[in-house]
């Protein structure tokens, strides 16, 4: 009886949440995102004065012609990729945490990152072994081929998950995802064993994660995929609130559980899969950002937290990229090292200081 | 080397005089004449006249023992009249004693805090006491397994492929004599990359295993080989910072087979050719700018200015854009940094091994198309001799013949200096549509 009352109170609390009062904070987050974007454009290994940066952005001519190329061909796609990837990972991480009611879930919990790794490994490592030139002839041996293979890999895992999603309960799905992930990683290890050193280095560089490998040509695929994923995710934000209390309760509240789950998993997989395909596996952002958002807005209402996750995710990814570039120095750090250095302390701090972690995952 | 010969000559002369004196006095027949005139000098027979000068040991005529053991050991004989001394290589040292050599590998890998010592004892002579933690190996070695392709040209040039019984990966090998021996079934594949199949190795039982170490326990195979009881020579030729230093490790390999004379002669010829080529390129009026490498997902791993690749470029009469850096390794740079500094440079060498024409380069990343070197036909890739299994002869025979690579580079930057030369290791990158 008391648990039912508590649940009803929580549900009422959620439905009574007023998104309007959070609007200013959301707008502030939006401005932070824009600020981070501009900052990322302005910093890099090459020192470009702010005046020239503004000139380039407004269509004028800078002091050095090469600077325009650097801003438009290198930093702009990189910053855009970072913003999109951060948003995608934040939102998909949020969805996974709610769906599986596990505060440590991230976007890769369904084995999607491992599927992408397997796809990339197939392309990168097999080219050397079979000595085949057909991949090169098709123009698939480079970055684009890797992205395509990663997409196919994560899509395959996604399809498998969706196939099972209709038939098995959610917790079983989690375990299935983990198992698919292990299987894919094992296959990757076998491929690594038979490979040449240079190809192994290419594959390992891919696992470092990077926003800088996406060119405008590839953006034509990445941007629509992320926008599609975000759109489906926002549509499923309201049903997600019901999932916070468990699937049985959601069902009793009239939420079409099967359809909602399908939409959630589809959007999460597309978001995580496309980011992994083009940027490599990026750790920690997907786990840390939902916690930060929930803490910042002091709510679990997905109608607020989801847009917040998108904005904050984009900002954090841009900041991580900034730090990884080590402005002023010519060398760069691997992106995953920076995200882990930022993300791990955040998660630890959140878990230690947050009193009501359990209540936001009523289990 | 020369010192040994000088002493050798004098001591032989002194020996003849004293032996004759002794023979007349004692009336005992001495085998000295046989010793002095001995044809092949494969083994030393009979007691050599015990009288020798105090300061210089008696020296074997005919050079080091190339095969087999000494039958009767004499502590006053210097069994290694042929010696090596490294002139360019800084990674190994050798100290000669009458019947054994102490060889030390000083920097087996980057930032190593260990060295590897070997006491190479002439067969048929006693092992010295107090060797410490050094590996004691009897030389000349009869069978060897080599786990890296840079070791194979050394064995080939020293005429030792008949002693090679195991290698670490058939697909990557280019040295013709080794490939032939593989095809006739005379060599076993005992591993692949860094993984070694210890069972196969135990079955093969070579007297010596040559390998390389990286200092990472997950990748190195020498710990398990040493634990299995093998004699393991760690060849750290890759650590040298000059092309000649790298190639001079043929002398290190020769130490295990008493082939010092051959190694000295072979290397001296190559060094002379290399120095002559470098001198040729020294006085050019213009040193064109050049850069190397390629980017992987936004990071460009640029070879450091302190390494052998940078040295090649300097010796070939070019200006390496990152010569100011003095690291021996690769610097992880931002793509935009390279773009800013190198977009106007006329030459680009040593790109990704999988690119064979300009279209491959552009397919990898369309931003490469802005580099002048690619647009104006100044891109040359070092994969002309890349075999189907992924093994690049640039790293095999090229490693042992730096004068050939230098000729290629001089031909690229200053074609009028070497009009007859044709590129061997380098491939000129042109659009796929061109022949």
Image (cartoon, coloured by chain):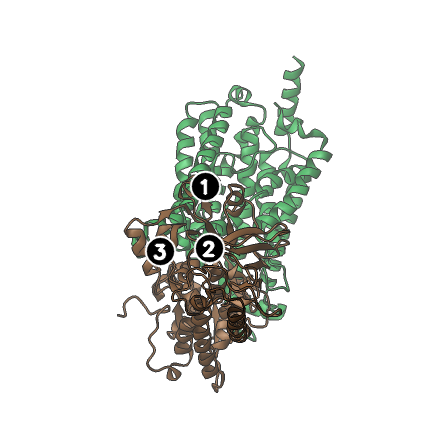
Chain colours: A green, B brown
The crowding category of the residue bearing disc 2, from other C-alpha atoms within 10 Å (few below 14, some 14 to 19, many at least 20), is: some
Q: Chain of mark 3?
A: B
Q: Nearer the viewer, mark 2 or mark 3?
A: 2
Q: Quick check: B337 above or below A308? A: below
Q: Residue at coordinates 47% horizontally, 78% vertically from top-left?
A: B275
Between A193 and B325, the residue placed more toward the observer is: A193
Answer whether labels 2 and 1 touch (C-beta < 8 Å).
no
- The image shows residue A82 at horizontal and vertical percentages of 54, 52
> Both on one chain, marks 2 and 1?
yes
The answer to whether residue A223 is seen in the rendering is: no
Q: Quadrant of residue B367?
A: bottom left
Answer whether labels 3 and 1 touch (C-beta < 8 Å).
no
> Both on one chain, marks 3 and 1?
yes
Which residue position is annotated with label 1? Answer: B198
Which residue position is annotated with label 2? Answer: B71
Tell me how far mark 3 sits from mark 1, CA to CA: 22 Å
Which labelled disc corresponds to residue B162?
Answer: 3
Between A172 and B200, the residue placed more toward the observer is: B200
The crowding category of the residue bearing disc 1, from other C-alpha atoms within 10 Å (few below 14, some 14 to 19, many at least 20), is: some
The answer to which of marks 2 and 1 sits earlier in the sequence is: 2
Q: Residue at coordinates 63% horizontally, 55% vertically from top-left?
A: A323
Q: Quick check: A241 above or below A304? A: above
Residue that protrudes farthest toward the top in the picture: A1
């Amino acid at each position: 009886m008391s648990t039912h009352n508590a649940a009803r109170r929580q549900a009422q609390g959620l439905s009574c949440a007023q998104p309007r009062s959070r609007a200013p904070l959301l707008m502030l987050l939006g401005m932070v995102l824009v600020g981070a974007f501009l900052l990322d454009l302005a910093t890099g290994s090459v020192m470009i004065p702010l005046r020239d940066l503004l000139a380039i952005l407004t269509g004028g001519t800078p002091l050095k012609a090469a600077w325009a190329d650097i801003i438009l061909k290198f930093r702009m796609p990189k910053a855009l990729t970072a913003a999109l990837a951060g948003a995608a990972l934040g939102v998909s991480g949020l969805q996974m945490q709610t769906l599986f009611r596990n505060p440590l879930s991230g976007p890769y919990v369904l084995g999607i990152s491992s599927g992408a790794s397997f796809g990339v490994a197939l392309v990168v490592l097999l080219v050397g072994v079979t000595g085949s030139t057909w991949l090169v002839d098709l123009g698939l041996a480079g970055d684009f081929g890797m992205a395509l293979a990663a997409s196919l890999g994560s899509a395959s895992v996604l399809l498998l998950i969706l196939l099972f999603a209709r038939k098995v309960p959610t917790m079983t799905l989690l375990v299935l995802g983990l198992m698919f992930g292990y299987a894919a990683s094992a296959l990757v290890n076998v491929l690594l064993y038979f490979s040449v050193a240079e190809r192994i280095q290419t594959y390992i560089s891919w696992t470092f994660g990077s926003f800088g490998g996406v060119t405008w040509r590839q953006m034509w695929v990445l941007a629509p995929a992320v926008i599609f994923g975000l759109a489906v995710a926002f549509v499923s934000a309201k049903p997600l609130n019901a999932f916070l209390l468990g699937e049985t309760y959601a069902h009793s509240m009239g939420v079409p559980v099967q359809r909602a789950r399908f939409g959630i998993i589809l959007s999460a997989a597309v978001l995580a899969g496309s980011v992994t395909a083009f940027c490599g596996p990026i750790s920690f952002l997907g786990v840390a950002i939902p916690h930060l958002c929930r803490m910042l807005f002091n709510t679990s209402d997905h109608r607020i937290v989801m847009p917040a996750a998108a904005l904050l995710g984009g900002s954090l990814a841009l900041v991580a990229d900034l730090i990884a570039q080590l402005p002023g120095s010519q060398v760069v750090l691997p992106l995953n090292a920076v995200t882990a250095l930022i993300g791990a302390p955040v998660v630890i701090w959140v878990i230690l200081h947050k009193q009501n972690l359990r209540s936001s995952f009523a289990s | 080397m020369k010192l040994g010969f000088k002493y050798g000559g004098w001591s032989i002369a002194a020996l003849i005089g004293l032996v004759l004196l002794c023979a007349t006095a004692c009336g005992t027949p001495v085998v000295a004449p046989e010793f002095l005139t001995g044809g092949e000098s494969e083994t030393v027979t009979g007691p050599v006249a015990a009288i020798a000068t105090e300061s210089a040991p008696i020296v074997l005529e005919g050079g080091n023992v190339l095969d087999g053991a000494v039958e009767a050991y004499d502590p006053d004989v210097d069994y290694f009249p042929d010696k090596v001394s490294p002139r360019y290589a800084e990674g190994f040292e050798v100290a000669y004693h009458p019947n054994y050599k102490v060889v030390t590998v000083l920097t087996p890998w980057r930032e190593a805090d260990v060295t590897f010592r070997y006491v190479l004892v002439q067969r048929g002579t006693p092992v010295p006491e107090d060797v410490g933690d050094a590996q004691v190996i009897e030389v000349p070695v009869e069978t060897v397994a080599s786990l890296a392709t840079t070791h194979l040209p050394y064995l080939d040039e020293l005429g030792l492929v008949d002693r090679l019984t195991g290698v670490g990966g058939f697909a990557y090998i280019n040295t013709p004599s080794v490939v032939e021996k593989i095809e006739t079934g005379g060599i076993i594949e005992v591993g692949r990359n860094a993984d070694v199949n210890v069972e196969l190795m135990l079955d093969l039982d070579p007297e010596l295993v040559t390998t390389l170490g990286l200092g990472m326990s997950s990748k190195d195979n020498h710990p398990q080989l040493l634990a299995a009881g093998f004699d393991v020579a760690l060849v750290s030729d890759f650590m040298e910072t000059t092309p000649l230093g790298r190639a001079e490790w043929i002398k290190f390999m020769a130490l295990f087979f008493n082939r010092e004379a051959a190694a000295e002669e072979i290397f001296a010829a190559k060094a002379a050719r290399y120095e002559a080529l470098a001198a040729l390129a020294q006085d050019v009026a213009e040193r064109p700018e050049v850069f190397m490498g390629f980017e992987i997902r936004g990071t460009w791993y640029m070879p450091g200015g302190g390494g052998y690749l940078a040295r090649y470029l300097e010796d070939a009469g070019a200006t390496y854009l990152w010569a100011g850096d003095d690291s021996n390794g690769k610097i992880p740079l931002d793509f935009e940094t390279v773009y800013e500094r190198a977009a106007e440079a006329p030459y680009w060498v040593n790109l990704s091994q999988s690119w064979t024409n300009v279209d491959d380069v552009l397919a990898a990343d369309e931003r490469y198309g802005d580099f002048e070197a690619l647009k104006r036909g100044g891109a040359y890739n070092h994969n002309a001799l890349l075999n189907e299994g992924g093994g690049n002869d640039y790293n095999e025979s090229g490693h042992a013949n730096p004068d050939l690579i230098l000729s290629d580079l001089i031909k690229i930057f200053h074609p009028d200096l070497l009009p007859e030369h044709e590129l061997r290791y380098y491939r000129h990158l042109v659009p796929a549509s061109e022949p």
